[in-house]
Every structure is written in C-alpha cells, then in structure tokens.
Amino acid sequence: PHTAFDPARLPADGCELCRAPGGHLVAQQGLWRVVRVDDAEFPGFYRLVHREHVAEMSDLPLTEQRRCLELLMGLERLL
C-alpha cells in the first residue's frame, strides 16, 4: 500500500524535512516517519524523522526521546 506524506503542521523556515519526506517514504504513523535515503555512498541508509520540526533529539520531551530510541532499535532489528 502507498503511504502518503504528512508534512509538519508548523514547518520551520528552510527545513526540507518539514516540507518533504527526505527520501523514499517507507512508513509514517503518528509523529514519526521512516524514509530510505537515496545516497550512493551510503546504501541502505534509512532515516527516522519526527513529523514536527525538532533540531536536536535533546529538544524532545523525555517520553518522545524514549519513543525515538525504541523506534530506532526496532528499525535496526528489521534491517
């Protein structure tokens, strides 16, 4: 099934990831999306992106930081 990109509700000026998927959109649910980045130097490079603009992981509340790490570890296990 095709996954539609859901952009940030309040995009940051100049942030490409707020306005575009940032690669081939693999999955998107809630506040998170997974994209496969097309980069010849880094084959198999995937990115986990928060739906709203977050400059640094430390800017997230602790619950979202934990969720991010859970999702990253799950993605690593799948790959």
Image (cartoon, rainbow, N blue to C red):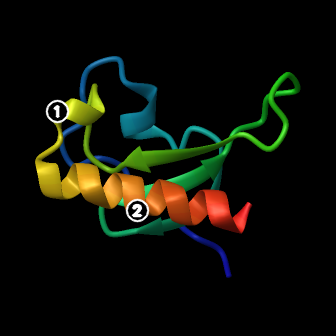
Q: On the rendered structure, is 70 left or right of 13?
A: right
Q: On the rendered structure, is 7 left or right of 34?
A: left
24 vs 19, nearest the viewer: 24
SS at mark 1? helix
* Quarter of the C terminus within the rendering: bottom right
What label sits on residue 22 in the rendered view? none
Most extreme residue toward the top is 14
Most extreme residue toward the bottom is 1
SS at mark 2? helix
Q: Earlier in the sequence, mark 2 or mark 1?
A: 1
| Amino acid type of the residue that numbered disc 2 sits on in the rendered structure | Glu
According to the picture, the residue beneath numbered tag 1 turns out to be 59
According to the picture, the residue beneath numbered tag 2 turns out to be 70
Tell me: residue 70, above or below residue 20: below
* Quadrant of residue 53 within the rendered picture: top left
Instruction: Count residues near mark 2 (Cα–Cα under 10 Å), then give few for <14, some for 14-19, many for 20+.
Output: few
Instruction: Count residues near mark 1 (Cα–Cα under 10 Å), then give few for <14, some for 14-19, many for 20+.
Output: few
Tell me: residue 5, above or below residue 53: below
Distance from disc 2 to disc 1, alpha carbons, whole Å, reads 17 Å
| Residue 12 drawn at (x, y percent) | 24, 27
| Residue 7 drawn at (x, y percent) | 36, 50
34 vs 2, nearest the viewer: 34
